[in-house]
Amino acid sequence: MRASELLTVTDSGLYCPPGGFYIDPDRPVDRALVTHGHADHARSGHAHVMATQQTLDIMKIRYGAGFAGAEQAASYGNDLNVGGVHVKFVPAGHILGAAQIVLEFEGVRIVVSGDYKRAPDPTCEPFEPVPCDIFITEATFGLPVFSHPPVVEEIGKLTTSVTDFPERTHVIGAYSLGKAQRLIALLRDNGHDAPIFVHGALERLNAYYVSQGIELGDIRLVANSSAEEMRGAVVIAPPSALGDRWMRRFDDPLPGFASGWMQIRARRRQRGVELPLTLSDHIDWPDLTATISEIGPGEVWVTHGREEATVRWCELNGIKAQPLSLLGFEDEAE
């Protein structure tokens, strides 16, 4: 069988004709396999959804109990049969519950990575490389300029700033699902034991992470706290809140932002950020190329991001590659 017969690009996204299912479709379909809970991959309205239990739970938190007609949980590493196609979910290292989806049919193995990273993250299972014929990868940061600094250095920038400016409230913009919880957990791992204050949009997701055994420590709601209580503390909020009147409740706030894009000076200026933290839940260029080399696929398909550079690198290294140019996926949730 040719790979294009096992997995093809349609108006709704990646479709597996032999199995009769889509992967991360961008509109409601009859049967969807979902890699993780971010809104650009996990949409409501499907008749049937298969995902890890944690992804299903996150979709329920975000969309409500009726987000799909029917749900089926897939455990990491379990072999499943979907319409005659062998399917397996393996860890992607992106956020809690995130998975790569491995398809095998008539001697062809395709791995759909979804979003992934190789950097340390205490809130989710690490990426698991799977040898395959075709590796389908994102390329959000698929340019040589994107070499993210060690995580411990970025967390150190934040804790040092808190020490150096004890009179200022450090308000850090971080995406509500995954990035915010990772930032909190990394702070705890680096010895920051003080209360951390959060925007109300993080409350339910934080509680879910804690229910899954992720230690977040003393977390308090901004809405229940005074400006004086939060002076000198770390506050974490969705990025949109930093440009909102919500910020007026803090005395002399020091705005920060946690994103892979903080490596780019123009992005920092655009955000008006005093404390840029280059912290991404997507793979950077060195890890992207190292991962492709480690997996050793015969062919690479690039779903979105900096497709041209990734395809060119593959070609220079003797690996057949093509861009898929899938629409609907964000460069990095902000």
Image: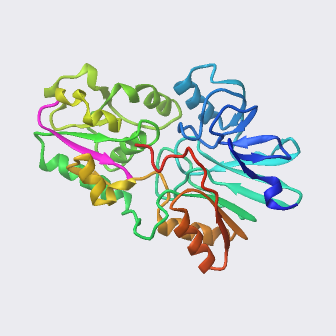
In the picture provided, is 242 more to the left or to the right than 305?
Answer: left
Of 110 and 320, which appears nearest the observer? Answer: 320
Q: Would you place residue 128 above or below residue 65 in this image?
A: below
In the picture provided, is 88 more to the left or to the right than 274?
Answer: right
Q: Position of residue 191 (x, y in %)?
A: 30, 47
**Rendered-image quadrant of the C terminus:** top left
- Which image quadrant is residue 303 in? bottom right
Q: Would you place residue 124 above or below residue 221 in this image?
A: below
In the picture provided, is 116 more to the left or to the right than 132?
Answer: left
Q: Is residue 77 in sight in this rendering? A: no
Which residue: 39% across, 27% down?
201
- Which image quadrant is residue 54 in? top right
Q: Is residue 254 in sight in this rendering? A: yes
Q: Position of residue 81 (x, y in %)?
A: 84, 43
- Which image quadrant is residue 80 in? top right
Q: Would you say the magenta stretch is mainly helix, strand or loop?
A: strand
Q: Would you place residue 287 above or below residue 197 in this image?
A: below
Q: Position of residue 176 (x, y in %)?
A: 42, 36
Q: Farthest residue toward the front? A: 11
In the picture provided, is 278 more to the left or to the right than 255?
Answer: right
Q: Is residue 15 magenta?
A: no
Q: Would you place residue 8 above or below residue 200 in this image?
A: below
Which residue: 64% across, 57% down?
324
Of 316 and 37, which appears nearest the observer? Answer: 316
**Count of marks placed on residues:** 0
Magenta residues, start to end: 250-259
Q: Position of residue 277 (x, y in %)?
A: 31, 53
**Rendered-image quadrant of the N terminus:** bottom right
Which residue: 51% across, 36% down?
213
